[in-house]
Image (cartoon, rainbow, N blue to C red):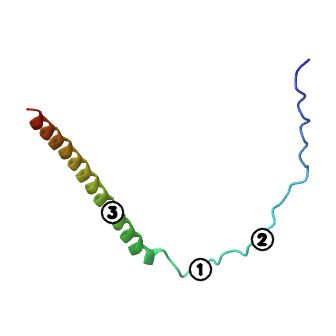
């Protein structure tokens, strides 16, 4: 009674559809290669590694300074109570 009516299944065309080529084919003999860009890629990877290492060093330094501040604050508060 309350079942939904499913739509009819569309029928596919019987003739095969061949896609038209819209771009000209690429030339077969290419004089360019990716070799000149290898140095640039290596330099970018090296810069990324160095920046990541610097960021990690800054993060470790910040954590150690924060811990030292908490310890010093605890020592100063403990000395003022006595």
Q: How many marks?
A: 3
Dot placed on the residue nearer the N-terminal end, 3 or 2: 2
From the image, which quarter does the C terminus lie in?
Answer: top left
The answer to the question of whether label 3 and label 2 lie on touching residues, with beta carbons closer than 8 A, is no
Q: Residue furthest bottom?
A: 31
Disc 1 marks which residue? 29
Q: Is residue 32 above or below residue 75?
A: below
Front-most of 76 and 64?
A: 76
Sequence-first tag of 1 and 2: 2
Q: Residue at coordinates 19% horizontally, 46% vertically from top-left?
A: 69
Disc 1 from disc 2: Cα separation: 21 Å
**Rendered residue at 36%/63% (across/down):** 48
Residue 51 - label: 3
Q: Does 21 sit above or below residue 52? A: below
Residue 14 in the image, given as x and y percentages of width and height: 91, 49
Task: Identify the residue under disc 2.
Answer: 22
Q: Residues within 10 Å of mark 2 (few under 14, many from 20)?
A: few
Front position in the image: 27 or 67: 67
Q: Quadrant of residue 74?
A: top left
Closer to the camera, 3 or 40? 3
């Amino acid at each position: 009674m309350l079942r939904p009516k499913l739509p009819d299944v569309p029928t596919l065309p019987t003739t095969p559809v061949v896609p038209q080529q819209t771009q000209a084919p690429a030339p077969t003999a290419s004089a360019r290669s990716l070799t000149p860009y290898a140095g640039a890629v290596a330099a970018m990877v090296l810069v990324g590694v160095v920046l990541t290492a610097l960021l990690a060093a800054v993060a470790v330094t910040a954590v150690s300074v924060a811990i030292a501040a908490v310890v010093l604050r605890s020592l100063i508060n403990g000395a003022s109570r006595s």
